[in-house]
Amino acid sequence: MVSDSVNHPLSIRVAGEADVDEIVGLTNKAYVVEQFCLVGDRINAADVRSCMAVGCYFVASDASDASSPSTLCGSVFTSISNGRGYLGTLAVDPLFQGRGIARALVAAVEDHCRQRGCGFLDITVVNLRQELFPFYTRLGFSPSAALPFPRPEKAVLPLHLVQMTKALRTPQDL
């Protein structure tokens, strides 16, 4: 359990099949800000299950009331390939944003990847989401490549992905 910047205790765990629908709803609610450049929902249940087949989701919930099951307030996908971690679809319910939940989820992914020997963690960000670059830069990520958007049929404006990378170990340990 971790506490966010407003002292709300968070419970972070690996998601299971029972969490799929809630991850979909939470993610689509958090990504509604992309409607200016993308059409439709960000993800669906099939997308989440497909991701779970190759990696895992971490989910965060408010743990201030241990007696009742709480709703998810954040989620993030991670996978590992060739000694590199990947972090994707980081989502925090808009009602919970600004409380450190995204940072806590990113830290959980970093720990997960580090424990599995990854030297680097990669993320991809839609280039038109300019407000996200300072956030990820503060977390230690740097732009490393431009990539095509994987679902061009959803784009309503020209866009691409910016891959950002963070070293998870010191240069001497790489």
Image: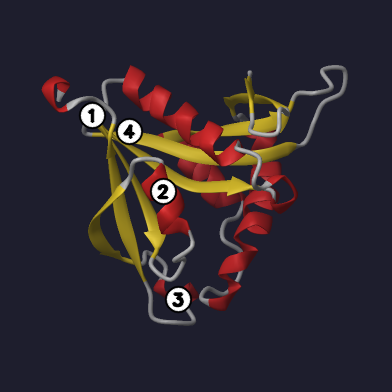
Mark 3 neighbour class, 10 Å CA radius: few under 14, some 14 to 19, many 20 or more: few
* Residue type, mark 3 in image: Glu
Would residue 77 be found to the left or right of residue 64 on screen?
left
Precedes in sequence: disc 3 or disc 1: 1
Local secondary structure at mark 3:
helix
Task: Return the disc, 3 or 4, that comes first in the chain's sequence.
Answer: 4
How many labels, in total? 4
Pointer 2 local density, CA inside 10 Å: few below 14, some 14–19, many at least 20: some
Mark drawn on residue 136: 2
Mark 4 vs 2, N-terminal side? 4
User: Could you tell me which secondary element the residue under label 4 belongs to?
Assistant: strand
Q: Residue at 44% of width from left, 66% of height from top?
A: 130
- x 57%, y 75%: residue: 39
At label 1, the amino acid type is Gly
Residue 128 versus residue 17 in the image, above or below: below
Q: Quadrant of the N terminus?
A: top right
Q: Name the residue under label 3.
A: 153
Query: CB atoms at circles 3 and 4 under 8 Å apart?
Result: no
Q: Nearer the viewer, residue 64 or 99?
A: 99
Left or right, 122 with respect to 55, comes to left
Contact, CB < 8 Å: mark 3 with mark 2? Answer: no
**Label 3 – label 1 distance at C-alpha:** 34 Å
Give the distance between the C-alpha atoms of the residues marked 3 and 4, in whole angstroms.
27 Å
- Measured as percent of width and height from the top left, residue 42 is found at 56, 61
Q: Which of marks 3 and 1 is in front?
A: 1
* Residue that mark 4 sits on: 80
Three-letter code, disc 2: Tyr
Q: Mark 1 points at which residue?
A: 119
* Distance between mark 4 and mark 2 Cα atoms: 19 Å
Residue 108's place in the image compared with 76, above or below, is above
Which is in the foreground here, disc 2 or disc 1?
Answer: 2
